[in-house]
């Protein structure tokens, strides 16, 4: 292999490249949250200077997350992860499988004074006690007799060196799963009127609609509200049919998708179909005084020539407060315009004092007449989202590996200890050396405990 | 007694605790640390009681959900998590100075929750999108992660103050801050634990999105910013592990990371997001 080849490999596997790529991915992601994306971009791009707009379009800044450069950055990150893992894994594997030498004279040659301790116990007894302590925490323990005395060695947590590779593999799977979903996945929506049937899937991204090999029937769509007016429930009662026979039926709710025919269906949206009838009723001094079906532009007289009503607007859902009509009422001396909401009681309960603050919403403005609205024969349509994502299992596995790897990194460290117990006049002399790939404070604590374990004067913990 | 009233009082207890921590650090007298710690503990007990009471109240109202469902409740829980971590760190590491930098964060979050008029503190029923068991575990993991990042941030400030060689008050400040190595190790552990909880938070959020919106990832601004925050801390952990960064550099990264956390939490509300409930 040539030198430049080698240098290229080192570059691909370098931590520097990883840091640069991650920074660029973060910056790109940030741009996508600041610049309006996809559909929202249209209005925004119209306000930009033409030169700037051309530049933004060339750089695909209106669809950052699907742009060539973003995909390229992610692919580069994948290559970097593979290269750096291949580069470092053999070293880590040698450290994991490397075995535990019974003695490490090199470490004892320069051991700090506070890693030594004199004990009144005989060397054999001190070594026994230390070995008991060692076995409590370390998976592998050896004991050998040498010319200098007794040598103990212990090791645990070697597998924790694998944690970081689990994280890297997990991220690779996340990227792969994301690409698989983007390439082979399917995303679309279906609109079905209550009582109607549909078998066409409108695909995202302007692709031609896809005809399903089954039909979906919506028997009923239910929307419920809390007293505050906030939505409580959206539910589509669906039936899935093949050749006119119902194969599956069930209720589809937000957070409760349904699976059929290799697709997963979600409750996405809903709306009202035109064709519902609006009935306006009125009372005079709390006594019912009449009512009629209304349409925009209608004009009619109140009983006894008390006033003339004109229907200015009819809305299915005004400002998310439900159906409402706008009336103009005049009796020659007074003239008012106001909205009549169907759900006025809920609106009043949720916003005390609203009628006084906003006379435009007061259906009793033309006192002593009070108007109310009722909808009959109204039909809803439901919008289902349908998706098939073959990448999802890969992503789930990847996420599991990342989390498992991180937890391994945090909670475990590869620790090795070597202990020498030598004969001293009136007892023994103990020396403890330790190595750890992480958590120096934890290593220090364990060394102190091992030293204490060999001394009878110390209460063992 | 209403839970929001208890939270209001807790805000002042935290302020008082912070004041004692500050006096201790500026005067350099250890005797101020006892009242500071005790006030923090009393505040934490009140805070916990308020959370439980709010949970119970929501059941009494027939709504019945954990107090983790809107912006007010998230502020209160964020602050609670910070206190939880602060008290554990103080108990285990004997580092008292941490309160000087963590208590004001906890105090400001509660003050924001209690005093800013735009924050609705009513117990609200769940809208359909939030009616999921993943709500509690998603919010719990995210905010525990944020709280660990807050702890790393406070430790970062301590490291920077300590390394600042100015004399006078600064000099006395430095004596009140423990050795660099201990802070450094705690900062690393805080950032790593925060990173684990943030990863859990993103994972639980993805599972939830998969069943609510039909996609485990939609590049929603909040999602994207949580990814940016995740990358910032991933860089920080790599800078330490691969390039051997320590001390001031790690401290600056912890500040930078926490700024990203705050933007993920609060700044995103100014962008158009599916996460508008928080």
Image (cartoon, helix red, strand yellow):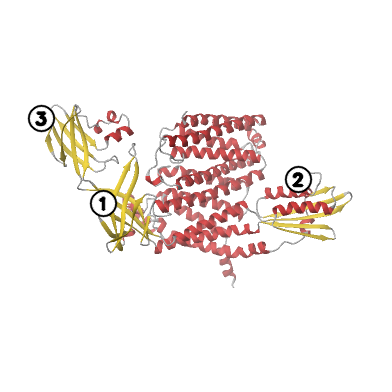
Percent x, y of residue B197: 53, 48
Label 3 crowd (10 A; few <14 / some 14-19 / many >=20): few
> Which secondary structure lies at badge 2?
loop
Identify the residue at horizontal 57%, vertical 45% (top origin): B252
Crowdedness near tag 2: few (<14), some (14–19) or many (≥20) residues, C-alpha within 10 Å: few
Q: Which residue is mark 1?
A: A194
Residue under circle 2? Answer: A460
How far apart marks 2 and 3 lie (CA) works out to 102 Å
Which of labels 2 and 3 is toward the front?
A: 2
Given contact means CB atoms under 8 Å apart, are the residues at marks 2 and 3 in contact?
A: no
Q: Are marks 1 and 2 on the same chain?
A: yes
Q: Sequence order check: which comes first, mark 1 or mark 2?
A: 1
Residue mark closest to the camera, 1 vs 3: 1
**In screen coordinates, is A431 left or right of A435?**
right
Mark 3 belongs to chain: A
- Which residue is pictured at 82% across the width and 54% down the height? A421
Residue A235 visible in the shown view = yes
Quarter where residue B267 is shown: top left
Question: A130 or B246, which lies in front?
Answer: A130
Instruction: Residue at the far bottom: name it.
Output: A1
Query: Which residue is at a point 82% across and 60% down the rendered structure image?
Result: A145
Q: Relative to residue B230, is residue B98 depicted above or below?
A: above
Q: Residue B153's mark?
A: none
Q: Is residue B145 left or right of residue A453?
A: left
Residue behind mark 3: A305
At x 60%, y 59%, the residue is A162
Q: How far separated are the C-alphas under marks 1 and 3?
A: 42 Å
Q: Nearer the viewer, residue A121 or A239?
A: A239
Seen from the viewer's position, the closer of residues B76 and B2 is B2
**Where, by quadrant of the figure, is residue B271 drawn?**
top left
């Amino acid at each position: 292999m040539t030198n430049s080849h080698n240098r290229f490999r080192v570059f691909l596997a370098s931590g520097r490249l990883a840091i640069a790529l991650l920074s660029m991915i973060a910056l790109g992601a940030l741009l996508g949250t600041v610049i309006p994306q996809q559909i929202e971009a249209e209005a925004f791009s119209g306000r930009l200077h033409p030169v700037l707009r051309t530049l933004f379009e060339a750089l695909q800044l209106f669809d950052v997350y699907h742009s060539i450069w973003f995909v390229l950055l992610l692919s580069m990150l994948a290559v970097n992860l593979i290269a750096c893992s291949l580069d470092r894994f053999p070293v880590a594997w040698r450290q994991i499988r490397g075995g535990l030498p019974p003695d490490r004279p090199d470490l004892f040659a320069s051991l700090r004074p506070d890693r030594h301790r004199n004990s009144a116990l005989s060397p054999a007894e001190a070594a026994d006690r230390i070995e008991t302590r060692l076995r409590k925490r370390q998976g592998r323990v050896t004991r050998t007799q040498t010319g200098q005395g007794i040598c103990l060695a212990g090791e645990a947590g070697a597998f924790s060196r694998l944690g970081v590779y689990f994280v890297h593999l997990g991220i690779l799977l996340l990227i792969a799963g994301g690409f698989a979903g983007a390439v082979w996945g399917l995303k679309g929506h279906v609109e079905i009127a209550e009582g109607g049937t549909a078998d066409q899937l409108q695909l995202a991204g302007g692709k031609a609609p896809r005809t399903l090999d089954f039909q979906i029937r919506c028997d009923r769509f239910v929307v419920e509200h809390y007293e505050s007016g906030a939505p409580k429930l959206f539910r589509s009662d669906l039936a899935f049919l093949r050749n006119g026979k119902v194969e599956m039926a069930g209720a589809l709710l937000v957070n409760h998708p349904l699976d059929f025919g290799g697709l997963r269906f979600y409750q996405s949206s809903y709306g009202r179909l035109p064709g519902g009838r609006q009935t306006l009723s009125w009372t005079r001094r709390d006594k019912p005084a009449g009512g009629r079906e209304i349409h925009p532009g209608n004009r009619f007289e109140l009983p006894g020539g008390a006033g003339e009503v004109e229907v200015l607007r009819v809305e299915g859902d005004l400002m998310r407060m439900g159906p409402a009509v706008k009336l103009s009422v005049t009796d020659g001396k007074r003239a008012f315009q106001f909205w009549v909401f169907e759900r006025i009681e809920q609106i009043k309960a949720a916003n005390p004092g609203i009628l006084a603050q906003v006379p435009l919403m007061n259906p009793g403005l033309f006192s002593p007449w009070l108007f109310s609205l009722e909808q009959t024969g109204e039909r809803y349509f439901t919008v289902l989202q349908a998706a098939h994502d073959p990448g999802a299992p890969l992503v789930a596995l990847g996420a599991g590996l990342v989390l498992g790897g991180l937890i391994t990194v945090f909670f475990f460290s590869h620790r090795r200890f070597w202990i020498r117990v030598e004969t001293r006049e009136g007892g023994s002399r103990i020396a403890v050396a330790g190595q750890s790939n992480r958590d120096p404070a934890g290593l220090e604590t364990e060394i102190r405990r091992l030293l204490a374990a060999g001394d009878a004067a110390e209460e063992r913990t | 007694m209403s839970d929001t009233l208890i939270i209001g009082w807790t805000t002042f207890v935290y302020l008082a605790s912070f004041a004692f921590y500050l006096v201790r650090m500026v005067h350099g007298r250890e005797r101020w640390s006892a009242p500071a710690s005790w006030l923090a503990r009393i505040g934490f007990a009140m805070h916990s009681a308020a959370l439980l009471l709010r949970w119970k109240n929501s059941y009494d109202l027939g709504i019945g959900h954990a107090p983790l469902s809107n912006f007010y409740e998230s502020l209160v829980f964020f602050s609670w998590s910070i206190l939880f971590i602060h008290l554990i760190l103080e108990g285990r590491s004997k580092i008292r100075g941490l309160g000087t930098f963590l208590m004001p964060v906890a105090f400001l979050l509660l003050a924001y929750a209690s005093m800013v008029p735009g924050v609705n503190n009513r117990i609200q029923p769940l809208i359909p999108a939030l009616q999921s068991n993943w709500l509690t575990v998603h919010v719990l993991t995210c905010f525990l992660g944020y709280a660990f990042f807050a702890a790393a941030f406070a430790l970062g400030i301590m490291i920077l103050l300590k390394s600042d060689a100015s004399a006078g008050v600064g000099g006395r400040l430095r004596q009140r801050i423990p050795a660099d190595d201990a802070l450094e190790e705690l900062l690393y552990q805080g950032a790593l634990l925060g990173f684990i909880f943030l990863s859990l938070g993103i994972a639980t959020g993805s599972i939830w999105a998969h069943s609510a919106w039909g996609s485990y990832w939609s590049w929603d601004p909040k999602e994207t910013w949580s990814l940016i925050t995740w990358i910032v801390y991933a860089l920080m952990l790599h800078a330490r592990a691969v390039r051997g960064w320590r001390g001031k550099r790690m401290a600056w990264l912890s500040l930078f990371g926490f700024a990203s956390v705050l933007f993920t939490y609060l700044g995103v509300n100014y962008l158009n997001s599916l996460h508008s409930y928080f």
